[in-house]
Image (cartoon, rainbow, N blue to C red):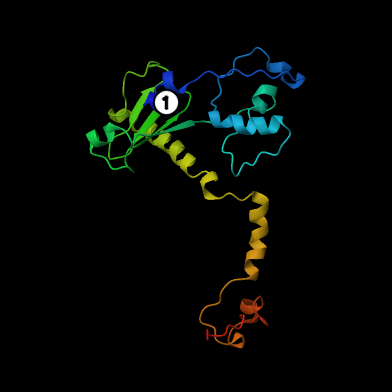
Amino acid sequence: MDGAKTFFHDAAVKVPLIIYDPSSAADGTRGTVCDELVHVIDLAPTFVEVAGGDVADHVLEGQSLLPLLYGETAWDRDRVVCEYDYSSTPLTDALGLSVREAVMLMVADRRWKLIHCEGGFRPILFDLKNDPDELVDLAEYPDHRDIIAQMYDKLHAWTRRIAPRTTRTEVQLVALRKTLRRRGVVLGIYDENDTDLELTVAYRDRKAQERKPPA
């Protein structure tokens, strides 16, 4: 999200995307309009796939848009998320917030948009169907608590995504399940014969490099 826009109304975050794919695979969707939920970060894996490469999905968080262009499969994304860090703006001081508190997050689906503000503020909720201009904040009304909870569930699912956890591929992680067992440190064992063989089999007959004290 462009920092100059400062908030999450559709006029700022719902940017039209026009794609031209000259390949015959896209003929079935040519000239059509798609209203699926997509991110700008979907462009990088799309370009990689168009170029014939393998998408590093442990690094690139988006999804390739080719299935939408080719009409192959249903799009399974049920929410979009935006972040805004305003810690360098005068608003942070005006609200008495720390740098870490000056953060907002938005999660939206086809019907609802929830805005979460760090710093102890209550959320903001818009009904995109009945209030497309996003003028009425419904979060203060008790009858929308269930909707707020559902939208927070979607936001929390996004925070638990795999991308922030590792930069290793799935193949590498599976391989490490076995190789990591071969080495390590066994604490509190003076003699390898004092414990079970299974616990020290990877360390037997291995000695630390002999080091002489400095002269």
Q: Residue at x 63, y 79 (%)?
A: 200
| Horizontal and vertical percent position of residue 95 | 24, 35
Q: Quadrant of residue 114?
A: top left
Query: Could you tell me residue 41's position as x and y percent?
Result: 55, 32
Residue 144 vs 153, above or below: the answer is above
Instruction: State which quarter of the image contains the N terminus.
Output: top left
| Whether residue 13 is visible | yes
Q: Residues within 10 Å of mark 1 (few under 14, many from 20)?
A: some
Picture residue at 31% right of the left edge, 33% below the top: 89
Instruction: Report whether 211 appears left or right of 49.
Output: left
- Picture coordinates of residue 192 (x, y %)? 61, 85
Q: Amino acid at mark 1?
A: Trp
Residue bearing mark 1: 112
Q: Secondary structure at mark 1?
A: strand
In the image, 99: left or right of 57? Answer: left
Residue under the point 39% across and 24% down = 5
